[in-house]
Amino acid sequence: MAAQPTPKGAWKITFLLFLFMLVNFADKIVVGLAGVPIMTELKLEPEQFGLLGSSFFFLFSVSAVVVGFIVNRIATRWVLLALAAIWALAQFPMVGTVSFTTLLICRVILGAGEGPAFSVAVHAIYKWFPDEKRTLPTAILSQGSAFGVIIAVPALNWVIVNHSWHYAFGALGVVGLMWVAAWLVVGREGPLVQTAAMAKAELRIPYLQLLTSRTFIGCCAATFGAYWALSLGLTWFTPFIVKGLGFSQQQAGFISVLPWVFGATIVLLTGWISQVMMARGFSTRGARGVLGSVPLVVGGLFLAAMPHVDGAGVQIALLVVGSGLCGSIYVVCPPMLSEFTPVSQRGAVISIYGAIYTLAGILAPSVMGSVIQHAGGLLEGYMTGFTINAVIMAASGLLGLLLLWPNTERARLMAQEQPQPKFA
């Protein structure tokens, strides 16, 4: 059977959604990047700063689930527009003098707006690409996060060093409104959608059966560990470089980019290799499940080595490689879930998957803050926190591998679904 052609305009929409994720992660990273000046100005203890990092995720999962069901019925074009507008508006209160409470509330609101972002963007982009061509655009979409950090960190750090951390938030608000304007003009819904007749003919599967399949559980388990590492990087990487290793804020701005550069390379390679393997007839089990899970285990081993080596350079290198390897799982899980999920239920299932694994974002920053505050020394606290990260990352990778290895090819049979039609 000939491969289904990619609709005209698909890559233009992919680029716009790449920018969408770029803005999304620039919004996420700014608190961690400005962590030291924020803690200094507001006189925050490590536990309070950890709470601030976790607050972003308080409504993250809830909003992801709610919006996931909404996009089953409402065009993703308008949902994406509303989400980006919320992000932009949530930044502006920080331009002036703020209290810890105000900053906390704004981060909770921002998290509620950003919780559904990746899942909705994935659901939107799958309306432009058939199943066999989804891994590479998913990788590109994922890399909006890395490039959001790579591009934003030097620019925002310059604003923080030369002006104030308050203006960094304002700059992000302006950029967010610029994306809203661009999407309003150019963005549109993909053509690979169901007609009323197709929707009526499509088999619906009970959500309990979808959410208890080994593939779904395996994806959630593996990505939980990856997101633990990611949320630590968003909140604590720059403070670790400045307070733990003694670098200046300006130096830390450049060092903080390194994990994302390495991670971007890993994710793009994973997406490309996976798509090539699929095209050459490899099973989903190998081309997606194994390819995504194994780097998590290896990354955990790199992080576990950090407390046992000397020298800031070696420690940074281990942290860069270890945390960077976690990105591969984000590329492979959404396509695996879309293989056996009916199109009319896909938005909700991918969003519930996102809501579950991002629970790590609530826990990781607070755990690190508590460990640092109660440790015998600052550097000891950071190393203990990264060791906990290593164990969680490696264990989640192993669990994901065990669940995904025997089962991804049989997920469709377990769900008792008929083969997806060409429009899916």
Image (cartoon, rainbow, N blue to C red):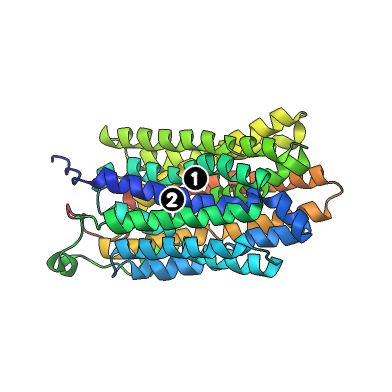
Label 2 Cα crowd, 10 Å radius (few <14 / some 14-19 / many 20+): many
Numbered mark located on residue 148 in the image:
1
Query: Residue 193, located in which quarter of the rendered image?
Result: bottom left
Could you say where residue 173 lies in the image, as x and y percent from the top left?
Answer: 50, 57
Q: Position of residue 188 (x, y in %)?
A: 25, 57
Residue at point 68%, 64% (across, down): 97
Is residue 18 depicted above or below 205 in this figure?
Answer: above
Q: Is disc 1 placed on a helix, strand or loop?
A: helix
Query: Which quadrant does the N terminus fall into?
Result: top left
Quarter of the rendering containing residue 167: bottom right
Label pair 1/2, CB-CB below 8 angstroms:
yes
Identify the residue at horizontal 49%, vertical 69% (top origin).
62
Q: Amino acid at mark 2?
A: Met
Q: Which residue is mark 2?
A: 21
- Residue at image location 83% in from the left, 51% down from the top: 375
The crowd level at tag 1 (other Cα within 10 Å; few <14, some 14-19, many 20+) is: many
Q: Nearer the viewer, residue 226 or 23?
A: 23
Is residue 251 visible to us here? yes
